[in-house]
Amino acid sequence: MRKLSLYRYSYVLMGVALLLLSILPAFMGSYYIHILILILVYAYLGSSWNVLGGYCGQFSFGHATFFGLGAYTSTILFMRFGISPWIGMVLGGILSMFVGIFIGFICFRYGLKGPFFALATLAFAEMFRVAALNIPLTGKAMGILITLKGTSFPAFQFQEKIYYYYIILAFNVFIVLVTHLIENRKLGDYLEAIKEDEDAAEALGIDTLRYKIIAISISSFLTALGGTFYAQYLFYIDPDICFGVHNSIEIFMRPILGGLGTVYGAFLGSLILGPLSELTRGLLGGYSGMHLMLFGVVLVVVIIFLPRGVVGLLKKI
Amino acid sequence: MAMLEVQGLIKSFGGLTAINNLNLAIEEGEIVGLIGPNGAGKTTFFNLVSGFLKPDCGKIIFKGENITGLKPHAICRKGIARTFQIVKPFPKLTTFKNIRIGAYHRSSSNRKLIDERVEEILNFLGLEEKKNMLGSDLTIADRKNLELGRSLATNPKLLLLDEIMGGLNPVEQGRMINVVKRLNQEGITSLVIEHNMRAIMLCSHRIIVLNYGEKIADGTPEQVAKNQNVIKVYLGDQENVRD
Amino acid sequence: MFFQMLSNALVSGLLMGGVYASVAIGLTLIFGVMNIINFAHGSFMMLGMYVAYWLFTGLGLNPYISLVPSFLILFFLGAVIHKFIIIHSSDAQNILLITLGIALFLENFAAFLWTPDYRSIEIPTLAKSLFIGYLAISIPRLIAFIFAILLTIGLYIFLKTTTTGKSIRAISDNIEGARSVGINIKKISLISFAIGAGCVGAAGAVITPFYSISPSVGLVFVIIAFVVVVLGGMGNFWGTFLGGLIVGLGESLGATYLPGSLQQFFIYFVFILILLFRPQGILGGKRA
C-alpha cells in the first residue's frame, strides 16, 4: 500500500509551515493578520473539539458551552476582581472541565450516543446561553465590554495584533503536540476503539464510560482556553457570541472538513473555511451569516463525498 | 473449584425466558462445546457471562469470585475474553492496531513489550502479512482470526468463542480447530459455541447442550451424541412436527 | 386576579402548544419511519411561512388558503431533498449533520433573498380576541390550534386507512418485516419525508397571522420540535400532540411567572431529563 510521500514527510512539512507562519505576518497588513488570527483561533478550537469528536467519535453540538465558560470566567474575574486573564484562563479551563465531566457523565452514563448526544449537548449550550442572557453577573444581553488597558501582558491585552498572532500560533503548536501525544499512545488507541465499536472495546477491557469522560474533560478544558483568548482579542463577549449554536457549528466544521481524528485536520479545515468565510462575507455583503450558507453546502458535500475530510483526500493522492 | 460456575441463572426478555434456571460448571483446562438449536440461548449466555447483559436471577462465579453484574470491561480484566458471533473488527484501524488495543491493559505499559506480544499473536494466527491492512479490508477468515487475536491479546484465562468457525471453509475450519487446541495446551480454557457438529465433537473435552435456555445434556462428546433428548431436539420430535 | 393571569397563561399555553404539536408531528413521522433526525425541519416551516407571506403580500391571499400551496411546495422540496441528498446516507449521525447543513443553507439563503428582517402579516379582521369571562382567546391562535387538531386527526386517519399510511406504519414498526412483504422502503421513506416537510410548511403558513416571520425562526422551532418529539415519544403520534401541549403550557407558565426568558431554560432542562431518564417519552415510542 503506497502512502503519499507528502504524508510521510508531514513532520518536515509542518515544520516548514510553522516557519512560514512565523514569518508571514512581517509581510502582511493588519487586516490579513486579523484573518490569520481568526483562522488559527478556530483551528485551535476545532482541534480541541476533535479530541472528543474526531478521536472518540462523540460529536458534540454544544462546544460553545466550554468556549463560553472560558470566556466569561476569565472576563468576569478580570473585570470584577482584577485577576489576570492568564490565571482566569486556567481557572476557566478547570471550571469548563468540571462542567464537561458533568455533562459527559450524565450523557454517557445514560447511554446517549450519536445524534442524541449531539442534541443533548446542544441543549446544554442553549441552557447556558439563556442563563447568561438572564443573570446580572454576565451582563445579560448586553454582554461584557473589557476595559482597555493598552498593551499589558498581565492583562493579556495588546495594542498590536502581532502579539495575539504569536500567542494563538503557540496555542496551535501546543494543541498539535497534545493531539500527537494522544494519537500515538494508549489513550488515542482506546478513544478510537470506542469510536469504531464500543461493544468490542468493552469486551477488550476498555472502560468506555471512563475514557469518554477523559476525552470530554480534555476537550472541554482546551476549548475554554480558546474562549479566553477570543475574549481578550475582541474585547467583547455576549451570550450569543459565546454560547450560541452558530459558534458550536463554526467549531466542529473545521475538523469535519479537514479530517476527523487527525492531528492537522482542524488546522486544514480552518485554512480553507477561514478565507472562504471572509470571501463570502465580502461578496454577498451585509448580513453576517452569509458564510453559513456555504458551510451548509460544505457540510453536506463533505459528509456524503469526503467522509475522511481533506486529510483523507490527501492520503489517497 | 471450577473455573467458571453458573448458578440458577435466569434471563427474560419481555415475556420470553431466554435462560431458564441454568446451572453449569467449566473446569480449568477444558475445551467445552456449547451447542443447541437456534434460539437456545447460547449467545445470550455468553452475553450474560461477559457482562453485556445482566441476569434477572442467579450467580456467575469466576475463579471463586462473584462476577455477576460486572461491566464487560471489568470482566475482561478478570480474565474472560469473548468473540462475537458477527465479528466486530475495528474497521478503520489496522490489524496491528486492532490487536494492540487488546494488549494494552496487561500489567506492563512498556510499548516495546506490547508490540512484541502483538507480533507474537499475529504470527501465531498467520496474520503477519496483513498487519497493516485495515480491519474492513480483511477476508472473513482473517476477521475471525483477528477477533480471536484481539481477545488473546487481553491475556485471558477463559475464552468464550461464539461461532468462531462461522463462514469458514473446511480448510480454514481445520486450522481454527488446531488453534483452539494449541491455545488449550498453553493453558487457556475455552467455551465454544458452534453449529459445526463434527468440529465441536472433535476438539471438545465435554459438551453442554442447551435448549430453550435450559441444559438438557452435559457430558463427553460420545455421551452427548447418544443422548436421546439431544437427538430429539436436533432431529425433531415426531409428535410435534411443525410446518 | 391570580386566576385571571393563570387561566390566560394556561389558555395561551395550550393554544401555542397545539402549534408546537403541529410543527412536531411531521418530525415524529419522519423519525418514526426512517429513524432519522431532521434538523432542517424548522427551515421547512420557515419557508412555509415565507410562502404564505409572499402570497399574501403579492396576491392578497389569505394565509389559511396559502397553507395549501405551502404544503405542496414544501412537499415537493422535501421530496427533492430526500431523493438527492438524504438517500446518500443511512447513518443517523451523518443524517443529522447533513440536515444541519441543509438547515444552515436554507436559513441563510432565505436571509440572502429576503434579508433577516422580521416581517409580519396583518389581517385586521382576524387580529381580534374572543372574550369568555376574563379569558382572552386570540382568534388567530385559536385557528392555529384547530388546525393542529385537524392536522393530527387527518394524519392519523391517513396512517390508519390508506395503503401508503399503512406502509408507513409497517416500516415504523418493523422495517425488515415491511421489506419482506414487498413494501418499497425507498419510496415510502421519500413520501414520509415529503409529507413531514409539507405538514410543517403548512403549519408555518397557519401561524403567520400572529407569529413574525424571519429566517432565524427555523432554528427556534426545530429545537422546540425536538423537545416535543422526545417528550412525547419518538414516532408516537398522540404523544407528540401531548408533548406539544406540555411544552406550550410550560413555556407559557414560565413566561408568565419566571423572570426574563428563563422559561426557555426549563424547556431545555426538561428535554435533557427526558433524554436521560425516559427516552421513550411520556407515552412511549422508539427508544432514544
Image: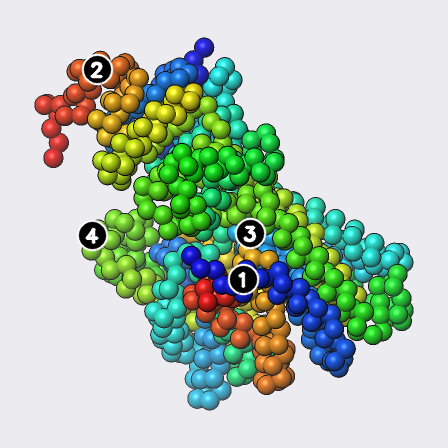
According to the picture, the residue beneath numbered tag 1 turns out to be A7
Residue at screen point 55% across, 82% down: C112
The vertical placement of A302 against A260, above or below, is: below
Q: Nearest the camera: B143 or A249?
A: B143
Few, some or many C-alpha atoms within 10 Å of disc 2 (few <14, some 14-19, many ≥20)?
A: few
Q: Is residue B242 visible?
A: yes
Q: Nearer the viewer, mark 1 or mark 4?
A: 1
The numbered mark, 1 or 3, whose residue comes first in the sequence reads: 1
Q: Quadrant of the N terminus of chain C?
A: bottom right
Q: Which mark is residue A131?
A: none
The vertical placement of B102 against B233, above or below, is: below
Residue at screen point 62% across, 53% down: A180
Residue at screen point 22% across, 13% down: B223
Does label 3 lie on the same chain as label 1? yes
Q: Nearest the camera: C238 or A159?
A: A159
**Marks 2,3: beta carbons within 8 A:** no
**Label 1 – label 3 distance at C-alpha:** 19 Å
Q: Nearer the viewer, mark 4 or mark 3?
A: 3
Few, some or many C-alpha atoms within 10 Å of disc 4 (few <14, some 14-19, many ≥20)?
A: few
Identify residue type, mark 2.
Glu
**Marks 1,4: beta carbons within 8 A:** no
State left or right for residue A199 relative to residue C249. left
Q: Which mark is residue A55?
A: 3
Q: Nearer the viewer, mark 4 or mark 2?
A: 2
Q: Which mark is residue C181?
A: 4
Identify residue type, mark 1.
Tyr
Q: Is residue C122 visible?
A: no
The vertical placement of B9 against B52, above or below, is: above
